[in-house]
Image: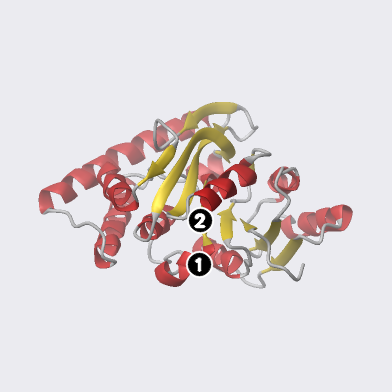
């Protein structure tokens, strides 16, 4: 383990005891073996840490590392903590209740290898219910291929939603974090898309239109339908991208973005609440 791996899979657990075996198992089953798995537990009270430690003792794989936060850092703090421990040139953040298809790491890393201009690679994801039942596939583009970064940033902001994908659908170049910084604590509801768009100011997007990951929805993940707060958060992302040298938007365009964000957040929340327990 002296040589840094190509890929750092980072799992920030919180209250995830029920999903540890499935999530970690999907990493152990990868066709690509040049990875490390870094896990943090954010002071869970449901036995998450104990389940992780028992699994690590059973599989005895030196690629697995685990750290337990003595106090809660919160979602963004835990995400940044686990990424800060990564050693790979590519980073794959997998939330503690999601999972990967066996060829996910291999396929995404290969695209970053073959396309040096790509800052990140995203893939379609299979949305599943709390019980793991397949519900539908989400994709940000209709065809696989390389998309210029800055137009993708502009398009992403004008849609008012996360067009790139949830963390489990994305792999990015670790070296770019020196330019972008980590996840931003002041962005509460749009944390992932804020970083994806900042990364795309420094490179292109490669998209794979095949579901390479499983994104789970359940009561805990649906949360409250905080449309006003989410809209304000998305507009904060617009401000941050403009300040970072990205595209700028007129007052009318900002109203359009706010309307899109409000509508799409309501639709997403409604669908997820309806399907979560199937």
Residue 202 appears in which quarter of the rendering? bottom left
| Quarter residue 162 falls in | top left
228 displayed left or right of 89 = left
Circle 2 residue: 172
Q: Where, quadrant-wise, is the N terminus in this rendering?
A: bottom right
Q: Quadrant of the C terminus?
A: top right
* Residue at the (22%, 56%) spot, across then down: 247
- In percent of width and height, residue 14 lies at 62, 57
Rendered position, 259 above or below 251: above
Secondary structure of the residue carrying tag 1 is helix
Mark yes or no: residue 278 visible.
no
In this rendered view, identify the residue nearer to me: 171 or 43: 171
Q: Could you tell me residue 146's position as x and y percent?
A: 41, 43
Q: Does the image show residue 236?
A: yes
Where residue 239 sits in the image (x, y, percent)? 25, 62
Front-lying residue, 77 or 248? 248
Q: Where residue 175 is drawn, which disc sits there?
A: 1
How dense is the environment of label 1, judged by Cα within 10 Å: few (below 14), some, or many (20 and up)?
Answer: few
Q: What element carries label 2?
A: strand
Badge 2 crowding class, 10 Å Cα cut-off, few under 14, some 14 to 19, many 20 or more, is many
Query: Which mark is on residue 190?
Result: none
Q: Which residue is drawn at 64% across and 59% down?
A: 6
């Amino acid at each position: 383990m002296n040589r840094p791996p190509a890929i750092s899979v980072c799992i920030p657990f919180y209250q995830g005891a029920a999903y540890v075996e499935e999530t970690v198992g999907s990493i152990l089953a990868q066709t690509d073996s040049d990875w490390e798995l870094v896990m943090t537990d954010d002071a869970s009270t449901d036995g998450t840490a104990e389940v992780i430690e028992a699994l690590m003792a059973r599989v005895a794989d030196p690629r697995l590392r685990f750290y337990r936060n003595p106090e809660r850092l919160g979602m963004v703090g835990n995400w940044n903590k686990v990424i800060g421990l990564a050693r790979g040139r590519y980073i794959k953040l997998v939330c503690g209740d999601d999972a990967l298809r066996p060829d996910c790491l291999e396929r995404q890393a290969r695209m970053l290898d073959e396309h040096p201009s790509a800052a990140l690679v995203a893939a379609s994801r299979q949305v599943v219910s709390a019980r793991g039942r397949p519900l539908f596939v989400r994709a940000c583009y209709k065809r696989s291929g390389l998309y210029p970064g800055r137009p993708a940033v502009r398009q992403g902001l004008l849609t008012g939603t996360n067009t790139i994908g949830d963390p489990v659908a994305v792999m990015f170049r670790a070296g770019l974090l020196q330019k972008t910084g980590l996840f931003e604590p002041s962005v509460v509801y749009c944390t992932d898309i804020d970083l994806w768009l900042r990364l795309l100011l420094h490179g292109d997007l490669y998209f794979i239109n095949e579901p390479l990951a499983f994104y789970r929805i359940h009561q805990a993940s649906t949360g409250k339908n905080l449309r006003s707060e989410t809209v304000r958060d998305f507009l904060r992302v617009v401000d941050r991208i403009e300040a970072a040298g990205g595209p700028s938007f007129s007052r009318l365009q900002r109203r359009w973005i706010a309307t899109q964000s409000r509508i799409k957040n309501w639709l997403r929340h409604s669908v997820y609440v309806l399907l979560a327990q199937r």
